[in-house]
């Protein structure tokens, strides 16, 4: 297991540097936007990674409610937390791209922007709940809230979709197909970020396992002291 | 006892309690009044603009006022271990939840009925669209707030500072519902576009979350 | 040239976020490790 972790860390580092080279140097420069377009190679893969992590959170919450397996609970916590980190990257890099291209930092009516923002808010409130919850039934309550949050996403999407069609706003690069070389770079970057997400989740998972073991041991210790 | 007998008994008990004490409704009313007055200082309500912002103001005021009532929903049952007694009784969890949600629905509807004239007076509102559409919007919107609010109030019972936890959970999840209520109300007030889509969205939201709440409430009640 | 600033800003921001998250995790892990050692004694 140690060995697997080291291997993954090495592979991630290699893949990330290769992806960085591809994104900054190998990828062709976009004609209308210029070099700013290269932000996409970080922005879009991060968004996809965050969505994958939130999906894992949803599935493992359901699995927890059915099987009551603590591993599923830890996986739900870990995927939500790492997902929020990736979502933060999306929300920070988005405006940095929008400013030179659209001339504004934020387009309130834009569907992808707003859906991502609401997603970010929902999962932050999920993490706050996990932190503030007391007693041994945190996993059940958290899983229930995770299901509520995941079901909310399509509704958010539809509501903003209609909102936008009524209030036109600058929308991302007017459709058009992606240059195959650009798509290639995008996929390499996605692979790299997925590896990074896996690595971060692994560390967070081990941390949570160790933390729960320590909490248990501390509870035992205080029990022994009080019975003495 | 059957499902509806339990619902009716709990609901009647809650309404009688509220009728005698009037704690929640007084607090909500005064809170709503404060919001109306403060908003009227913050914006110039005489402007033609008020027709476009009123939808947002009204629903934000109702949302904040509703949180006051929602926070009290379950706290009352904690005092004499009523909730524990309920848990060990053979009665199912869902009738209790439905009674609580209906109770909150009635309280918030009363609040809205009393506050709406104030809003009309303060902001000189007059609907340019079909005004009857405001009734389904208000009912569906209130149910959307109340069903999730009642559920999350039960969840935040299990947290440290539960008065803070409820809005933190409720507001992000309610964003699509809020968007629906605000835009539907604005559409009716301004008469520029149809509110149909937003009413359908509210209906979908209500159906989805009522179903999920009834499916999952038992887990929350048992979680102790 | 100005657009390059935005590009670098976005990439640096991404790495700052991931870096600080990793730092937080490593710190917490060290603390848990220390506590584990203390309990084992």
Image (spheres, coloured by chain):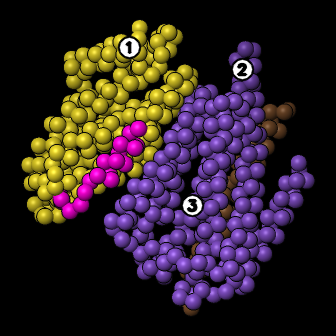
Q: Which mark is residue A225?
A: none
Chain identity of mark 1: B
Which residues make up the magenta segment?
B189-207
The chain displayed purple equals A
Q: Is residue B153 magenta?
A: no
For the point 65% across and 55% down, which residue is it?
A52
Q: CA distance from mark 1 to mark 2?
A: 42 Å
Quarter of the view holding residue A42: bottom right
Residue A186: x and y in percent read 68, 73
For image coordinates 56% across by 45% down, the residue present is A127
Which residue is label 1 attached to?
A: B6
Q: Picture coordinates of residue B60 (x, y %)?
A: 28, 48
Where A63 falls versus A119 (above or below)? Answer: above
Lower sequence index among marks 2 and 3: 3
Residue linked to disc 2: A223
Which residue carries the number 3 mark? A88
Q: Which residue is at 25% across, 41% downward?
A: B136
């Amino acid at each position: 297991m140690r060995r697997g972790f080291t291997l993954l860390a090495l592979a991630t580092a290699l893949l990330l540097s290769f992806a960085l080279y591809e994104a900054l140097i190998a990828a062709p420069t976009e004609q209308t936007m210029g070099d700013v377009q290269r932000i996409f190679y970080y922005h879009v893969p991060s968004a996809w990674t965050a969505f994958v992590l939130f999906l894992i959170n949803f599935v493992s919450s359901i699995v927890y409610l059915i099987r009551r397996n603590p591993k599923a609970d830890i996986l739900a916590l870990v995927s939500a937390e790492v997902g929020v980190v990736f979502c933060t990257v999306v929300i920070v890099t988005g405006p940095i791209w929008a400013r030179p291209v659209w001339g504004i930092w934020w387009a309130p009516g834009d569907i992808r922007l707003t859906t991502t923002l609401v997603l970010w808010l929902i999962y932050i409130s999920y993490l706050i709940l996990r932190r503030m919850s007391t007693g041994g039934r945190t996993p059940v309550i958290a899983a229930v809230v995770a299901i509520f949050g995941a079901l909310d996403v399509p509704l958010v999407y539809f509501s903003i979709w209609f909102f936008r069609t009524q209030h036109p706003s600058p929308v991302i690069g007017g459709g058009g197909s992606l240059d195959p070389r650009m798509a290639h770079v995008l996929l390499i970057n996605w692979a790299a970020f997925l590896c990074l997400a896996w690595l971060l989740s692994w560390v967070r998972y081990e941390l949570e396992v160790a933390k729960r073991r320590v909490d248990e041991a501390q509870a035992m210790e205080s029990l022994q002291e009080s019975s003495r | 006892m059957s499902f509806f007998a339990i619902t009716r008994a709990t609901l009647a008990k809650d309404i009688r309690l509220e009728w005698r004490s009037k704690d929640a409704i007084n607090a909500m009313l005064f809170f709503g009044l404060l919001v109306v007055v403060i908003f009227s200082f913050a914006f110039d309500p005489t402007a033609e603009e008020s027709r476009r912002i009123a939808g947002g103001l009204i629903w934000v005021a109702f949302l904040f006022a509703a949180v006051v009532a929602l926070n009290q929903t379950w706290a009352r049952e904690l005092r004499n271990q009523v909730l524990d007694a309920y848990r060990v009784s053979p009665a199912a969890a869902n009738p209790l939840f439905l009674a609580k949600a209906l109770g909150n629905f009635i309280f918030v509807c009363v609040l809205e009925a009393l506050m709406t004239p104030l809003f009309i007076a303060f902001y000189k509102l007059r609907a340019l669209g079909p005004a009857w559409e405001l009734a389904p919007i208000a009912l569906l919107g209130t149910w959307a707030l109340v069903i999730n609010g009642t559920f999350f109030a039960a969840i935040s019972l299990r947290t440290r500072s539960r008065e803070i936890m409820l809005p933190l959970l409720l507001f992000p999840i309610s964003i699509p519902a809020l968007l629906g209520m605000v835009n539907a109300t604005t559409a009716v007030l301004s008469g520029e576009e149809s509110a149909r889509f937003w009413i359908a969205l509210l209906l979908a939201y209500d159906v989805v979350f009522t179903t999920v709440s009834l499916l999952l409430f038992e887990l929350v009640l048992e979680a102790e | 040239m100005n657009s390059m600033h935005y590009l670098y800003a976005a990439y640096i921001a991404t790495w700052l976020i991931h870096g600080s998250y990793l730092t937080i995790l490593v710190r917490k892990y060290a603390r848990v490790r220390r506590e584990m050692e203390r309990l084992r004694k």
